[in-house]
Every structure is written in C-alpha cells, then in structure tokens.
Image (cartoon, rainbow, N blue to C red):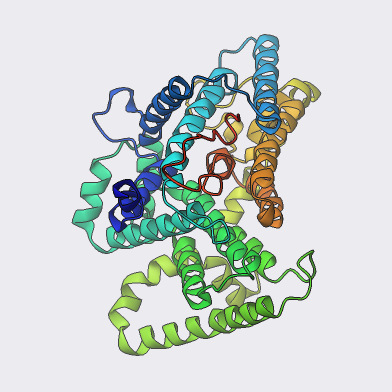
Amino acid sequence: MRKHYLFDSKLYYYLLHIVLFFYIYSVQFIGVPFGIGTRVFMGIMGFSMFLLEILKVKKPIVFNRPFLIVYFALFCISLVSLLSLLYNRTTDIEFFIKYPVSIIIIIFSSYFVTKLVSYKSKDENQIPVVMQLFINVVIIQIIIALIMFAFQPIRDILNTTQVTSDQELKVLEQTLEFRLVGFGSKFFGSGIVNGFALILIGSILRYNSHIKINVFKYTMSFLFLFVFGMMMARTTIIGALLALGIVFQPKNSLGFNINQIKKNTKFLFYLLSIPIISVFGVFYFLPEVKESIELAYNFGFEMFINYFQSDSLESASTNQMKEMYVWPTSLKTYLIGDGLFSDIATGEYYMGTDIGILRLIYYFGVFGLFAYLYFQFQIIYAAYLKNRRFKYMFAVIFIYCLVLNYKGFTDLFFLNILFVLNNTYQVKSINEKNIIYNSISSK
C-alpha cells in the first residue's frame, strides 16, 4: 500500500514533470564532462534499469517485429552513410556512427522515462499519462521562456548554466529583444516540440469522445502554446494547423458522435472568444504588458501582420528559407551524396543550407534520404501499433515530420519513442509480479 501511495502522490507526479522536462529538453550544463546533456544521463540510468530487470526476470529478451524493423531502418541509414563516405573519401561520420549511437541513447533514456511514468496508476480508458505530462512540460517551458524574457537577471543566470555554441550565442544576441528563448529550448527545435504538443492536444480533443474532457482547459492550453510558441519559433504554426485538422476532420471511422460534436462546438467557441476577450483586457487594463510583449508578438506573427499590411504572407524567415534552397547540380550528389553534413572548413551547414531534405541529400543522396524517412515512418508506425486509438494522430505526425524537413533538419524519434515504449496501459498494478517489457522485449 505504501508503494501505491508513493506513485500516486502529487510529489511523484511533479517529479515526472521534471524528468520528462530534462528528457525533452536535453540541457547541457556547463562543467559536465564531454558536454553531455541530461538525456544521456537518463540513457545510462535506463540501461542500468534494463539490465537489472533482465537479471531479475532471468528470461531471454525477445524483440518484437515492429521494433526489429526500426533497427533495420537504422542499419540502412548507417549502411548508405558508409557507402557515401567510402565513395567520397570523407570522414564526416554524422549518420554512420554518431546518429545510431544517439538513437541507442534515446531508446534507453526514453525507457527510463516511460518506466517511471508507468508506475503512475492510470485507467486505460483515460488519456495516457505521457500525453498529459508532455503538454504540461511544454507549457512550463514557455512560462520559463516568458520569465527569462521579462527578467534579464534570471535569463542571464539560466543561460550561463548551460553550454551555448558560438552560432547559438550569435543568434541569441541578435534576437534578444524580440524572441522568446527557453531553458534548453532554442529556435527551430523549440518550434518542433511546441507543434508536437499542439498535435497531442488536438488528438485528445478528438479521440476521447467516450470520456469527459475539460474542453476549456485544453483550449486555453492550445491558445497559450500557439501564441507564445509562435514567439519562440514560427514553425509552431505548422503543428497548430495540423492539430486543427485533427479536431475538425470531416469524416472518419468514429462515425456520428454527439459528444464529439459538442466538444468541437465548445472548442471552436472558446478558440474564437478567448483571444478577443484577452486582447481587449490586455489593451485596456494592462497596457504595460502589451508594450513589453509587443516586439515578441510582432516577431511571432510577422507573416500575418505583413498580410494585413501588404497582402503578403512573407516574413524575414520565409525569405531566408527560400535562399537556402540550393539544390545539387551533380547527378552523383543525388545518387550517393557528397559525404558531408557540415562544412569542413567553417563547421557550418554544408553548402550553406539548413533545409532538412537538402542536407540529407548532400550527405548521402536520395537513397539516404529515403532511408531516413523510412526510419522515421517505422518508429511512428510502431507507436501507432501500441496506440491504435490515436491512429490518425500518428499519420499527421508523419506529415508533420515531412513538412518540417522542408524547413530544417527534423528528427522526431525522441518524441515518438515515448509512445512505443509507453507501458501505461500494460501495467495494471505496481505489485504485479510479471514484468512486461513493452516494445523492447516481450515474454
């Protein structure tokens, strides 16, 4: 009973938020050997837990088929990378060694996180704990970003505790006055996570018609993440649009559901009314707040401001992105790549482009690009097999991955693996004698 009380306590629930925070936002603290991030530490702990459970159960590990396919896809990435390196006689081992190693670390770190989450008792008919935690953690990150934006001493303290590259430091100095930056969450990467959280909110509203949901709370969360997420990275809008597509998809296998119609109606009403009331309140009652956040707002919603002023949805970011579409001119590059992910001389993006699909093509050609996308698809498909109720969500997440790679290099493995190893549904009781290994292993 004492064990149950511990894992069901508020203190343990708060602890899960901290653990997931440092998993999603892998912070590299200054002074840590080799500059490793918090996710690596969790990987070590996850590997230790895994070994202990193997010794405890004393049974051979049997990898299930979906996870084996994920490993096969990862092997394909490494193989194509090796061929590109050998053909081009280069030594950039980004996808030959570094990427596979990072994936293994992520697997064990996510195992550590989801194992802790599984101890939090939850009825399988409710919203998965990992989804609720994820949304809460992203909201917490944005609150931290707002505090850092408003109070320079706090921003300076938090920024000096983490490792920052010269390139990141340069961008930080240039955008200090008008862009929100979180703790361990910067620029394009923050937009990826923000958009992912919005997709989760849309999925919760859509696929939980059988239970009562506080629509007002999730609408507030959606608006908060969208508005302030845009001030961190305008990529957030992609996740917002896809999330709305999930909520308001016209037809699916769910059929006619009066509860879902009521939820959608409430969501739409709150989605339109809350911003109007909030803007009115800020303008007339809190003008000092309006002035302090105005520059960040103009940055986040620049494209919409430009549209109303000049009928153009362009922004400085979209114009810069257009300039980075530097396609290869050699057939050899398309076939096998140039074997370079970064410029040898400067250490910056190879060929001066940070467009995801182009960086992959330049590194190991279209075959490598397809191998990488196949790998992303397989982990998403494995997540779908474990969470079939949210099948449309995972289809949207794959689209999300594709779209983002037309903006910058995007890897969603560390987010999707949480749903592959998530054993919230499988663990019915903390005192259950039989340990279920989920997707890493099965009995």
Question: Relative to residue 3, is residue 80 drawn left or right?
Answer: right
Q: How many marks?
A: 0
Q: Which of 137 and 261 is in front in this view?
A: 261
Query: Residue 155 in the image: x percent, y percent?
Result: 25, 53
Q: Which of 220 and 59 is in front in this view?
A: 59
Question: Relative to residue 214, is residue 116 drawn left or right?
Answer: left
- From what the image shows, is residue 96 above or below residue 70? above
Q: Nearer the viewer, residue 255 or 221?
A: 255
- From what the image shows, is residue 243 above or below residue 348? below
Q: Nearer the viewer, residue 169 or 261?
A: 261
Query: Residue 150 in the image: x percent, y percent?
Result: 27, 64
The C terminus - image quarter: top right
Q: Residue at x 58, y 50 (%)?
A: 320
Q: Residue at x 55, y 54 (%)?
A: 196
Q: Is residue 383 visible to us here?
A: yes
Within the image, what quadrant is residue 437 found in?
top right
Query: Residue 81 in the image: x percent, y percent?
Result: 66, 19
Question: Relative to residue 257, is residue 166 drawn left or right?
Answer: left
Q: Residue at x 51, y 45 (%)?
A: 427
Q: Which residue is drawn at 70% across and 22% down?
A: 76
Q: Is residue 313 visible to us here?
A: no
Query: Residue 347 in the image: x percent, y percent?
Result: 47, 26
Within the image, what quadrant is residue 179 found in?
bottom left
- From what the image shows, is residue 278 above or below residue 8? below
- From what the image shows, is residue 275 above or below residue 94? below
